[in-house]
Image (cartoon, rainbow, N blue to C red):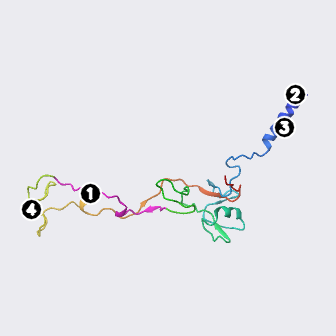
Amino acid sequence: MKTITSGLFLFIIFILVNTLPINDANAGDQPFLGEISYFAGNFPPRGWAFCDGQLLAISQHDALFSLLGTMYGGDGRTTFALPDMRGRVAIHQGNGPGLSNRLQGAKFGTERETVTVNNLPAHNHALMVSSDSPSSSVATNRALASTMVYATEAPNSTLDNSSMAATGGGQSINNKQPAATARCIISLVGIYPSRN
């Protein structure tokens, strides 16, 4: 009888452990409402939507609207927008030491940037000349001329264009970090997050 009771007890424990739902916070069991994740498929899973800025009806998603409001768009009366993460990298809102304050829902940054003189740090360009005293009226071998630096006659030598002419083409530069793409999705259903 003792053996049958022990066996029955173990069988009941086995059934309970393997059939009852476990409500701990394992990732993927049930997402928080409004949780954002990445997905490699070409369609959003059931209960999720792409973060592509689409407008949703408040009447159909009032709990999600209570979390997002109109920070990503919408009129706030009948519609609200999901975040538009296409071509974007997510960052945490707020600011840290030496960093700009970033508001939740704000977009910033550019893919390409044109560098101008005002963007460059202060710097000097070296003039490659000799420190020897001039010994000739003609500038030669990196030495300055002693006389007639400016003359009305035709020049007897030509300055090197690479050191005197403007350089650069004014084209914009790529401002993108190395990245791999996946689809950003947001949970339309799930556990309503509670405050601590």
Give the residue at mark 3: 12
Residue lying at the far front of the rendered structure:
196
Residue 154, x across and y down, in percent: 12, 68
What's under tag 3, amino acid-wise? Ile
* Residue beneath the point at 68% across and 49% down: 28
Give the alpha-carbon distance from disc 1 to disc 4, as whole Å.
Answer: 25 Å
- SS at badge 4: loop
Prevailing secondary structure of the magenta residues: loop
Q: Amino acid at mark 2?
A: Thr
Q: Are marks 4 and 2 in contact (CB under 8 Å)?
A: no
Disc 1 residue type (three-letter): His
Mark with earlier residue (4, 3): 3
Graded by Cα atoms within 10 Å as few (under 14), some (14 to 19) or many (20 or more), the crowding at tag 2 reads few
Q: Which mark is residue 147?
A: 4
Query: What residue sits right under mark 1 in the picture?
Result: 125
Q: Earlier in the sequence, mark 1 or mark 2?
A: 2
